[in-house]
Image (spheres, helix red, strand yellow):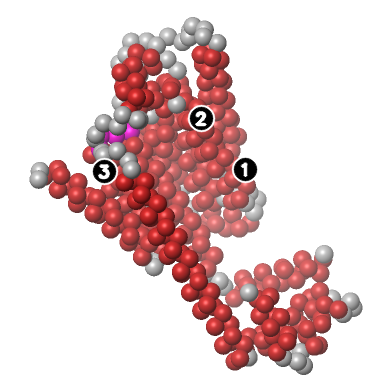
Amino acid sequence: MSISEIFKIILLILLVVCAIAVNLTKRLLPAIIIFMAYSTIMAVVWALMESPDLAITEAAVGAGITSILFFLTLRRLSRMELTDPADEEAVRQADEVEETDS
Amino acid sequence: MRESVRSWFREELSGMEEFLDTEEKPDASRVERKSAVRRWEEQLLSNPQMQREIQRRQQRYHTIYRLVAVLSCVLFGLVMLYMIAHMPHYGFANPRADEVASRYLEEGLKETGAVNIVAGMILDYRAFDTLGESFVLFTGLVCSLILLRVGARNPATLKHDQYFDTSSDAILHKIGVLVFPAIIVFGIYVIFNGHLSPGGGFSGGTILGSAMIILSASAGFGTTDRIFTYKRLNLMTFAALGFYSLAKGFVFFIGANGMHNPIPKGVPGALLSGGLILPLNIAVGLVVACTMYGFYSLFERGRIGHA
């Protein structure tokens, strides 16, 4: 078995490990980072399978843009979860005003 | 589930009528009725018998949910494995599907004029698919515009802009400004050499878009707002998609009627070769770059440019 074949097998095992780890990770931030790693490994696998077009796109879209959008969504969600009692009170009052108006 | 719990409780407990039939009091205001219902719900939930019932139903729900999830996962995996078992082995000849592939590989350079046969395939033989993909991206941008846009005059937006202005970080700012032109040049290189080397509109456009994202993340949105206003982004996307549709429609019309294609193929390997592939790559690159930056801007602050 040549070195390149061993390298390929290691990459494919890592790919499967990453795919399972994304599902099993409870916290969302590490899950996104593992997903990023999955895309990066996939890009290397595409390059080894002699399709550099796909490798470039996978690296740019899968590891780059998708992860950025995931991070932004996560930040938005965690900001929503930070509930201030004062804010909740304000929202409730606004609801009531709206209902008495209608 | 809440509705069934409510009906169950209505049967089980009496003495709550004054809260239950609040709907039938026409003189009570909506706020009063709502607070009465809220009180009633709080009393409901503090009842230990009720809590046990809710817990029992939740457990049943979770069991069924997990069972269905595992079953559908296993089923999907089995279907995929079955499909893979019937696929030809990697790297071996497949007489059923190799006809088209060998035709592309043997005649592709002559027919499309593109040295990179993948570009010849996705922008000449299968150009209609690529048009559909560009429109999918455009539709995605429009949908997130509808869902995420909050507008510049929203006070929440202004507050957010103050809090998350990263341009105050000097190191980040300088590195971003330093790296930006290099990434832009690389993206333009990938797009313009799409028919000569690996790459093309999609990957080059993504690189351009991520350059814009890096600049706006490091130097603040003020710098990119000067280049990418809402109007210009719309105009660029519209022009690129319109040009693509018109150019490909022209080629389809000519091909269907058996007319001579007036677009010169050029010398294979030269920058200006491959007929329509280079302009189409530029169009796709523009659409993708605009979409990627638009996504980022909408996700980050709910607007593109100043609008």
Specify the subunit that label 1 lies on: B
The front one of B158 and B101 is B101
Q: Position of residue B270 (x, y in %)?
A: 32, 14
Is residue A52 visible to the viewer in this orientation of the structure? no
Q: Amino acid at mark 2?
A: Leu
Which residues make up the magenta segment? A49-53
- In the picture, measured across the screen, residue B55 lies left or right of residue A21, that is right
Q: Does the stretch in magenta take in A52?
A: yes
- In the picture, measured across the screen, residue A2 lies left or right of residue B132, that is left
Q: Amino acid at mark 3?
A: Val
- Given contact means CB atoms under 8 Å apart, are the residues at marks 3 and 2 in contact? no
Specify the subunit that label 3 lies on: A
Q: Position of residue A47 (x, y in %)?
A: 26, 38
Q: Which residue is mark 2?
A: B131
Foreground label between 2 and 1: 2
Q: Which residue is mark 3?
A: A45
Specify the subunit that label 2 lies on: B
Q: Amino acid at mark 1?
A: Ala
Please name the residue shown 33% across and 60% down the image.
A20
- In the picture, measured across the screen, residue A68 lies left or right of residue B30, that is left
Residue farthest along the right direction in this orientation: B27
Q: Which residue is mark 1?
A: B307
Q: Position of residue B157 (x, y in %)?
A: 59, 54
**Label 2: element kind:** helix
